Amino acid sequence: MLRGASAHRPTPGWHMSVEPTDPMSEIWLTWQGRAISDSVRLGRYLGGSDHSAVFLTEPAAAVVKLVPAIPGLAESQLSDWRTAAGLAHPHLIRLLEAGRCEIDEQPHLYAVMEYADQNLAQPLKHRPLTVDEVREVLTPTLDALAFLHSRKLVQGQLKPTNILAVGEQLKLASDTVHGVREGGGTRHAVSAYDPPEAREGSYSAAGDVWGLGLSVFEALTGTLPPGLNAVGSSEHRQELVLPRDFSPTFREIVTLCLSRRPYDRPKVTEIEAWLRRQTAAAVPPVGVQRPVATPEATTPQLASAPVQPSAPERRSFVLLIVAAVVILAVAWAGIRAFRAHRNPAPPAAQAPRESPSTALAAPAAAAQQASPPGQVGAAALPAAIHEEVPDVPLRARRTIHGHIRVSVRVMVDKDGNVVAALADQRGPSKYFERLAIAAARKWTFPPADTPARRVELVHFEFTREGTKGHAVSVQ
């Protein structure tokens, strides 16, 4: 598990968003001890890459990140850091100061930040995390992301090296925080942790969800998913397929997080709701203890064997059970006779007896008749508790010629709430597809008797006159 230890400083080389590659370390090392402002002096060099370096401050109370001041991008970077410095959240690294400096006559930007003891990538070098440990990491991570997203901000580079421990508290790196971008380039090289749309310079809250999905996968397996480099932004690229042996607990949610198209990924609030249900299901109710396998329980021990009842005691117990069964049988017969006397059945022709094969085939035939065309093997659902139909503006409806059909596959929990949604049958228009997905997320269904999640198909039909929707169960 990711844990910090305030009394122990890790070996140099890791902090914030700095990668382990350090080709310029010889140059960075010569900068130790230099003052970069009236209040900041570089201490011990901790690590860096070819474009950034991290030092302890002197005295060693915080860390300093240095990056070259690139013309045209420097002011934007400073603006992002100053925005991050104005944020206060228990699960975000505090950014204390940001500014410009010159080192060896070269302009640089610097950010002074709270010191972190450890990052998630370090324990993953030794072993993957357990499912329970990943839940512990997810709770504060999602809390910090929800805080940022509510302010139209994103973490920007969510990955194990940016999930940090300060003492016993987990925090996300804040030096990568920036506003939502809809194109126009990026200030860092695109990596596997960046969503496919980042290749065009776009990054939204859905991009953080992509990074979250990859981080969860890596935390559980110690590696990144196979075939990750094949996922791109082109329409012909396929969705990422997880290995068959991946954790069944996280399989569905990680698959949704790694949807190639950003609007197919769940929102952080939806993942939070899913995690709460997962955590509640994993914890037994108060007063109920799960059985724990112990050496005493698995190894036969003559001294601790249960005491067997004597033969007379066993006979008395059996007779008591037989008497109870007889009394219940007589009572049931009396009730049935009483009902028959009070409600005599009218004379009617008896229906022919069904063979066992006919009786079994009838429900299946009825289910197929209730299914809409094209949904082989799908049984009709009872009416949804709440059906949300997309509100299509008049000017958009006027563009419709005939019918536009969109099917949305939704994952429903035992309480009937939709926890995730993605397009199943893609329509000819992304606009109507987005409307359909947004509406399907708001549907609710009858609660299920089992805790297992189920999958429903919500079909929408858009016409100039309006929109209709209905749901079909596929699981």
Image (cartoon, helix red, strand yellow):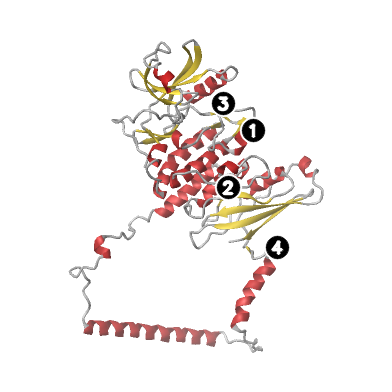
Find residue 200 and report its image quarter: top right
Does residue 354 appear in the picture of this structure? yes
Query: Which one is closest to the eye, mark 4 or mark 2?
Result: 2
Which residue in the protein does label 2 denote?
240
The quadrant of the picture occupied by the N terminus is: top left
Residue 457 in the image: above or below residue 265: below
Q: Earlier in the sequence, mark 4 or mark 2?
A: 2
Q: Earlier in the sequence, mark 4 or mark 1?
A: 1
Residue at the far left: name it: 303
Query: Measuring 31% from the left and 59% from the top, which residue is drawn there?
Result: 292
Marks 3 and 2, how far apart in space? 26 Å
The label on residue 371 is none
Marks 4 and 1, how far apart in space? 40 Å
Which residue in the protein does label 4 denote?
372
Marks 4 and 3, how far apart in space? 50 Å
Which residue in the protein does label 1 denote?
200
* CB atoms of marks 3 and 1 within 8 Å: no
Q: Amino acid type of disc 4?
A: Pro
Query: Which one is closest to the eye, mark 4 or mark 3?
Result: 3
Marks 2 and 1, how far apart in space? 19 Å
User: How busy is the neighbourhood of tag 4: few (under 14 within 10 Å), some, or many (20 plus)?
Assistant: some
Q: Earlier in the sequence, mark 3 or mark 2?
A: 3
- In the image, taking residue 234 as reference, residue 417 lies left or right, namely left
Q: Secondary structure at mark 2?
A: loop
At which x and y percent is residue 34?
A: 39, 13
